[in-house]
Image (cartoon, rainbow, N blue to C red):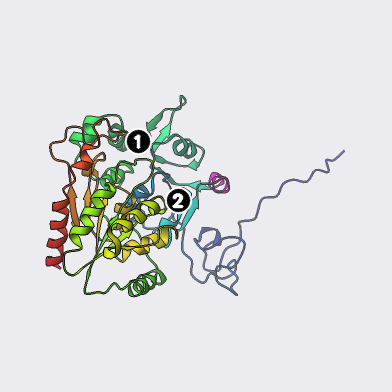
Amino acid sequence: MKSTKKKKRSPKKSFTIPDGTSPWDCKRFTGYKPCFPGTECYKECADNIPIGKRILIINLDAMGAVLQTTALLPALKRKFPQSRISWITLKNSYRLLDHNPYLDAVYMWEPESWLVLQKMEFDLVLSADKTKHACAFAATLNAKETLGFGMNKNGVIVPLNKEAEYNYLLGLDDHLKFRVNQKYGTQILQETMKLKWQRDEYVLTLTEEEKIFCEEYKKEVGLTDDSLIVGFNTGCSNLYPNKKMTIEQHETLINRLAEVKGLKLVLVGGPEDTERNAEIVRRVGKKVISTPTTEGVRRGLCYENICDVIITGDSFGMHAAIGLKKYVIAWFGLSCWSEIDLYDRGVKLIPEGLECAPCWKKVCPYNLECIQMIDLTRIVEEVVEYKKAR
């Protein structure tokens, strides 16, 4: 007796476009709608773009780290000019990758994305984070090669390739990380991924609409092109709350800079800085303009973009300023200043002679001495010097 069970049929991939290419190998082909309205992709390709090397970046770290990781994209494209580059990241960082010219697809860290990516095939996966969930996810993917970090059978994070070992050791050896290393974080990551390091910039792109918004907002609040606009990134993430100045220090700085002719002062920040910024305004009044803090990350980038100079701690706001190519006056305490590249647009204020810094501690046993040591006079002088140079 013959079985009546039907065999499962796989989709046909035999048809080709007359020029000999296949729609299955075109970046634009989705399989559910024409690439261009009114065209029949499977018969005639309007503009075939071969997929080439299929690459996925896994980067679920903090928002500032995601921006720093974008600096590896130019090197990646130099090595693999014909490639389709995808990126998966957390919800809070997802919009930072909008309009990135190097990326073909960006996935938000959620179950739907996991399912899609786990069914795809990749030539190369770059696992950038030393976190268990990122490393475990990397191991579930169908990839010919995975670089960076993974997890062994005991749940321990391990380097996956020889080039990742230096980066790996930075997490285990405080002396190496705090005292010896002089490489920028961008260089460390590029070398981890077997890329030839060049001093590539972050890739952070504003749209024309966003640029127009910036100009209109400046007019609305009375910021003119003949003034140097100085922004204060007042806060930081709640993960490391000691990466910010005190409100009293901001009050002192604003009062002193308000006396300098030709400056306009602006507060920027995110939702976690709303109350803090309001208190600063309550203390200094109309000497400073407080920008909205709850309109989302893209608008937050716009408000930072209106500034010429950003005064900041080592936080997402600092990385955003670097990505927007602003002049950055950054002070450091608990974090590693050697890993930050300002691309010759700014100055790093380092707590000289303080043996406990950097430390990466969430709780300070020494009454936050590194914050107390921030040289406010030096910051004022740096702003004045930059204004003169302009």
| Residue 264, position as x, y percentages in the image | 24, 67
Q: Is residue 138 left or right of residue 73?
A: right
Under mark 2, the amino acid is Asn
Please give the name of the residue rendered at 27% of the width and 59% of the height, measured from the top-left corner.
Answer: 284
Marks 1 and 2, how far apart at CA? 29 Å
The answer to whether residue 197 is seen in the rendering is no
Residue interval drawn in magenta:
110-119
Could you tell me residue 172's position as x and y percent? 30, 29
Q: Nearer the viewer, residue 299 or 18?
A: 299
Give the image quarter of residue 298. bottom left
Q: Main secondary structure of the magenta part?
A: helix
Relative side of 53 to 24, left or right: left
Using the image, determine if residue 287 lies above or below residue 70. below
Q: Which residue is mark 2?
A: 92
* Residue 33 on image: x %, y %: 61, 65
Magenta highlight on residue 116: yes
Residue type at mark 1 is Asn
- Secondary structure under tag 2 reads helix
Give the quadrant of the N terminus. top right
